[in-house]
Amino acid sequence: MASTRVIGLREAMKLQNIEAVWITGDVNRRYLTGFTGSSGYVLITMHKAFLLTDFRYMTQAAEQAAGFEIVEHGASVTDSLKQLLAAEGINRLGFEEDIVVFSTYRAYERELQPCELVPVTGLVEGLRQFKDEGELSLMKAAADLADRTYLHMLEQLKPGVTEWDMALELETFMRKNGASGPSFDTIVASGERSAMPHGVASGKVIQKNEFVTLDFGALMNGYCSDITRTVFIGEPSAKHREIYDIVLEAQLHTLEFLRPGMTGREGDALARDIITRYGYGDQFGHSTGHGLGMEVHENPRVSKLSDTVLQPGMVVTVEPGIYIPGFGGVRIEDDVVITETGVRRLTESTKDFIVLG
């Protein structure tokens, strides 16, 4: 029996008049099949679902990909695909235009004749925007680990350690507690470097009287969390407290009023308008949030450029910030699920202005 995900994909295929679709993206393959091996391809027709992989993964694929016909492909994956297309009478094949590189497309064009190749975008990604209860449970576990990691890091942060030391400590803690790895390159940015929104950990020594921004996430069971907290080491000045309080106000306001039916643009404005009102609009140069799931950045976007309508079941981040070159910066980020009436937080760490000695 076809899974709800395969059924949903077939509905999307009908809308684009596609007889079959060839899935080559790793994340989309895992989403559709549950197969966690490092090599494999998916062919979905209106009546059948195939997972092609090599000799190494045949047993694993049979165990994980329920409802799929498992095919051991030959030395040429394209030859195996061509045989399946002929056997199933497929004349029009969709492929992931955002994933297939041009050289591979040219090979398909040459080797799959007379099948017509149709570039498609967002078929699987559109399904992935809406998380079911199983997915939300996995994402909550990843968020809970991020929360526990933040508490652990509050005991580790002190003057004299490097950002690299802290990133290693953070990632080690997550791995010891169930993560397969970080969701993305861990950001530990202190002092003036905290004004860099993507200031991945460096050899800089953390010192007294400066911000430290921690932006990290746990990858668990194929799903990501993504949290940011900014703390202070030493004695904060009035300006340090001012920009922290503004970012916190913007973030809390967004969490209170973000709801289904809003566009990403409208959601972004909830935070941006507050920061702009305080005179720091030019120091908030990124989007308020982004979709989260099997990848740390996916649709929908909570951005001033996004007209996507937010709907229940979507998971997004809410992460306003202020960044002042030569001084420092603050970002506060939570992961939330869009519900029927608003949002539900997945990350629950305190957002009090933590001052460490």
Image (cartoon, rainbow, N blue to C red):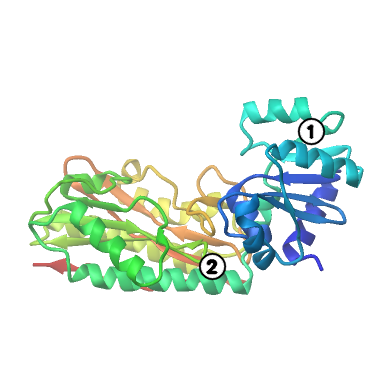
The residue singled out by tag 1 in the image is 117
Residue 14, given in percent of the width and then of the height, sits at: 85, 49
Residue 200: x, y in percent? 29, 47
Give the amino acid type for the residue marked by disc 2 in the picture.
Val
| 88 left or right, relative to 79 | right
Which kind of residue does numbered mark 1 sit on? Answer: Leu
Nearer the observer: mark 2 or 1; the answer is 1
Q: Residue furthest right?
A: 89
Q: Is residue 343 left or right of residue 68?
A: left
Question: Where is residue 37 drawn, in percent x and y?
Answer: 57, 56
Q: In which quarter of the image is the C terminus?
A: bottom left
Quadrant for residue 51, please give it. bottom right
Q: In this view, does 94 lie above or below 266?
A: above
Instruction: Kindly state the secondary structure of the residue where label 2 is placed.
Output: strand
Task: Let me know if residue 16 appears in the view.
Answer: no
Q: Point out residue 192 in the picture as x, y percentages from the top left corner.
A: 17, 45
Which residue is disc 2 drawn over?
337
In this picture, residue 103 sits left or right of residue 1: left
